[in-house]
Amino acid sequence: MKILVSAKRVSDPNARLQVAKDGKWIEGDVEYVMNYFCENAIECALQIAESQDGVETVAVGIGDEDTARFIRQGALARGIDRGIYVAAEESEIDSDLIARIYEGVVHRERPDIVLIGKQAVDGDSNQVGQLLAEYLGWPQATFASKVELQGDEAIVTREVDGGLEVIAVSLPCVITADLRLNEPRYASLAGIMKAKKKPLEELEIDDLDLDDADPKVKVVALSTPSGRKAGVLVKDVDELIAKLRGEARVV
Amino acid sequence: MSKILIVAEHDKGIVKKVSLSAVAFARQWAAKTGMSYDIAVLGQNVGPVAAALTAYGAGAIHVADHADLAHPLAPTWAKVLADLALDIGADVVVAAATTLGKDILPRVAVRLEAGMASDVIGIVQTKEGLGLRRPMWAGNLVGDVIITTDTKVLTVRAAAFDAAEATGGNSPIKAFAAQPDAAKSRTRFVSFDGVQSTRPDLAEAAVIVAGGRGLKDKFNAVTEPLADVLGAAIGASRAAVDDGFAPNDYQIGQTGKVVAPQLYFAIAISGAVQHLAGMKNSKVIVAINKNGDEPIFKVADYGLVADAFSAVPELTQKLKALRG
Ligand SMILES: Cc1cc2nc3c(=O)[nH]c(=O)nc-3n(C[C@H](O)[C@H](O)[C@H](O)COP(=O)(O)OP(=O)(O)OC[C@H]3O[C@@H](n4cnc5c(N)ncnc54)[C@H](O)[C@@H]3O)c2cc1C
């Protein structure tokens, strides 16, 4: 069995963000981290690989040059077997193009499962896994909080509005990882050493035979929303009730 | 004339209010573009849902009633929605940004060769044409985006569009001969474990009492009595859900629900960016936390630095007494 996992870098959620001059993306000296949901996808792939023989795991990262470093340190060092890095300008690609790049990689690699983080915490679109599944004509199980393989099926518990849904999808399939799927492990020192020798293939979008490399959605302007200003501290419950009844008139 | 197709979500025969927010978006988009809008109802035995939607000014209510659509499984629903969109010549397909909308609409977009924008909070005129505004980076930035394809697919954030009011009129109900192709979907519904609650839906509640990790195993004991007095919905931070004190359906934030009630109580919640992303547009925010330095106080209108285990029961008792 072969599993493809996503390994995307994102700016640290607590970083102060600066909008680039052209207003299309962020710029400057920001700290990057591995997208949290990709860490869950990686952990899920590793657990499947550890639970049965003959599973190969491959991490795919798309983006600026630095992405290759994240594949090595965030995926290969944790135990993923090898990596594929596809170079792309992060401000010029949308979810649709990313899904088509994955599709190209899937045609080369022919995996049984593609495990993708349910969303990237920069663009926050939550689309790539679903788009990819439709491009491939594969079933999907999104927002997964539990994955069990039984024969040629994956039984997936999904976090949906109103509760938890269980669906069964037959392989090959796309699964998108939610945060409660697992506790991602840290890379061990041995893992970090081993990762240095693991294969990491570098590709251009042109290597993947896409019809075109045009995004369908373009960011025209980014801005900082007007913030909320802090209100007042009340000294006790009585004052809180007085404010809520008097000033705010909400109770 | 070009058309917008709105996907109606429903539960036990009742239209979800979030879908009326999608109608509100459609009315705004229609006003700017001269389009009209139709509504799609998919499912099994959904006649009552369709009937309830005839007074919202839609050109037609399209009903795809089929046993294989009983559960909203992405491949089948997406196929039928895309078939319907092509059949009626829809240029825009819109749904609420619920887990259903997020799961299914991207597949509709691929089928229609359309670009898609998620979680839309507004319509904006950009230098490159009519665009859509959406939160990015957990709402720390907002992006104005344009979809360059002729057909456009999007989900809208219900908290940003007040549910459309019924305007009277009588939209015709039309049956659509759905072909879900279930055999090709390789997807099987197994079970659904729903949260049983008599409280209002988080998305629809005027008041929300949200609890965090600090409440520990007293989560219910603290939040429920206050919610009872206020007729409120109960929400939670991710940490409270992760620790097993609240069900996943309660989670508010970047990866949970996004809400904007009249009144939001954040009790023993620190105010991480990911939590703020889901509630900072609430009208009035009250924070109750024993640590006065927490970031939640930077967004709260009224902050009370106190131990929740004593302050919340006191608040509950006093509000109850006031209400008689
Ligand atoms: C990718 C990603 C997505 C995320 N998405 C979400 C999301 O959607 N929603 C979300 O909420 N979080 C989300 N998080 C998690 C978020 O970063 C925080 O970890 C989480 O919100 C913290 O929850 P909390 O405030 O309940 O817990 P803590 O940060 O542990 O805060 C507990 C608070 O309780 C207070 N407290 C303790 N005891 C008492 C007492 N007796 N009385 C009064 N106050 C008390 C403490 O002072 C503290 O402020 C996400 C994180 C990541 C990385």
Image (cartoon, rainbow, N blue to C red):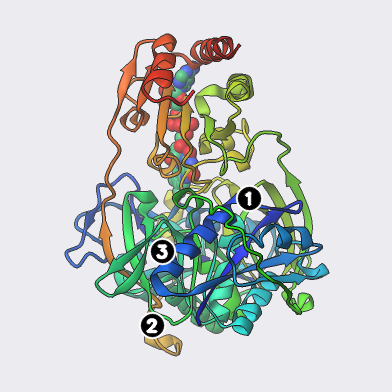
Give A27 or A124, whichever is nearer the viewer: A124
Pick out the residue farthest to the front: B169
Q: Is residue B73 visible?
A: yes
Location of mark 1 (residue): A159
Asked whether B141 or B286 is in front, the reply is B286
Q: Kindly identify which chain the residue marked by label 1 belongs to.
A: A
Q: Do labels 3 and 2 share a chain?
A: yes
Looking at the rendered image, the disc whose residue lies closer to the viewer, 3 or 2, is 2
Looking at the rendering, in which quadrant would you find the N terminus of chain A? bottom right
**Position of B101 relative to A226 (above/below):** below
- The quarter of the picture where residue B245 lies is top right
**Which amino acid is tagged 2?**
Ile
Q: CA separation, marks 3 and 2?
A: 17 Å
Among the two numbered marks 3 and 1 on one chain, the one whose residue lies closer to the N terminus: 3
Q: Which residue is drawn at the image coordinates 60% and 78% (left, top)?
A: B85
Chain under disc 2: A
Residue B17 appears at what percent x and percent y?
Answer: 60, 50
Asked if residue A64 shows in the view, the reply is: no
Identify the mark at residue A81; answer none if there is no mark. none
Kindly identify which chain the residue marked by label 3 belongs to.
A
User: Which residue carries the number 3 mark?
Assistant: A71
Mark 1, Cα crowd under 10 Å, few <14 / some 14-19 / many 20+, is many
Q: Which residue is drawn at 25% across and 47% down?
A: A16
Residue B57: give x, y in percent of width and height. Answer: 58, 64
Q: Real-space Cα distance between discs 3 and 1? A: 27 Å
**Residue under label 2:** A205
> Are discs 3 and 1 located on one and the same chain?
yes
